[in-house]
Amino acid sequence: MLRQFTLPFLLLLSCSSNDAKSSAWKKIKRVKAGKQYNEHEAVHIVVNKVGPFNNPTETYRYYSLPFCQTHSTTEEEDEVALTENMDISHLNRKEKRDGGVRHKQHMGESLVGDRREASPYEISFQDSVDWRLLCKTTLDSKALAKVSKAIYNNYFFEMFVEDLPMWGYIGDTVEEDFITEAQGSTGKSFLFPHLHFYLGYNRNKIVSAKVTTDMDRRVDISDMSEPIDVQFSYSVEWFEDELDWKNRMSRYVDSRFLPNSFEIHWLSIINSFVLVLLLTAFLTIILLRVLKNDFSRYMELDDEAMDEEESGWKLIHGDVFRFPQHTTLFCAAVGTGNQLLCVTFAHLLLALCGVISTNRRGSIMAGIVVFFFVSSFVG
């Protein structure tokens, strides 16, 4: 009798575990760039990653910091709106989304370290919003210390609307002692809980996106001895933009948020090039003088004097055609170098011809990986 109930129970348990695994690994299909929106249609804000501004290669999940993963309820939003003296009766409250759900990514995006996930922001096309409550949360001492450390290290966040990136800072420090690098010793740390989205559209397509923070709504989190209640909120401003959709990436060329270190320093390049030329010329002159003296001395010697023991650089003249040791390693190194040269020149040629899109995020990295495997016969 016990065996009759055990088998169905085990089957039910395995099905439930498989459903849990499938829901945990479920990924949202990405919104294709260039989508034509209808009025009041939902627009998805995708969060990507956070990291220190001075080291863009060090990145973490956006939700590694205690941000809101669920949107506030209607009752909570109405309650806070009364205290803020905000009229939110005209809001379009249709679609509810949970944050932290992973998005499908291309291979190049995964290679550059993207971690795209859904966010609970409720934004609709051409519907400007003065204020909305995202969520109310309480940050304990552990969460405050984590956020304070991120603010001290000048962390920034990255979001996307379709394929348009947006950047902003998590917070700011005031009167911080950067000389002694004593975190929180003399200054104050402020968290930016309010985000303002500027979204531009042209012919029912989103062509520009930008996010800013509100300094008037910043929260002081310097005192980490007690939990602090934080209200995360956002606002949206839509405007008609004359920028064509195909030229939407042109504004990121002169983006002020990107560090100036990416600019080409022509003076340093010219200085290094001239220095290499001078060193090469000096080395050539020295070698020519040494070899000229040796050749003139050999011309004056007879055959008996030539049989004397050789010295100096002439001792290694026989090593030029000597069979090298570790030939397998030597051939592998030469073959890999030839393969890398072919990959580099082929990739640059296709990028210049427009075959590989340089605007598509991660396309260059993905192209390098694909070309490296395709050109394996070169090595």
Image (cartoon, rainbow, N blue to C red):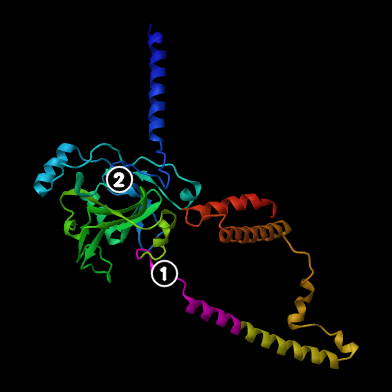
The image quarter containing residue 94 is: top left
The stretch in magenta equals 256-278
Q: Mark 2–mark 1 contact, CB under 8 Å?
A: no
Question: Which residue is pictured at 61% across the width and 53% down the height?
Answer: 372
Mark 2 closeness class: few <14, some 14–19, many ≥20 residues within 10 Å = some
- Which quadrant is the C terminus positioned in? bottom right
Q: Position of residue 86 (x, y in %)?
A: 13, 48
What residue is at 38 percent from the left and 21 percent from the top? 13
Q: Is residue 308 magenta?
A: no
Q: Identify the main secondary structure in magenta.
A: helix
Percent from the top left, x then y, of residue 137? 20, 45
Marks 2/1: CA–CA distance = 36 Å
Q: In the image, what residue type sits under mark 2?
A: Phe
Which of the marked residues, 2 or 1, is nearer the chain's N terminus? 2
Is residue 258 in the magenta section? yes
- Asked which secondary structure carries label 2, the reply is loop
What residue is disc 1 on?
261
Which mark is drawn over residue 125? 2
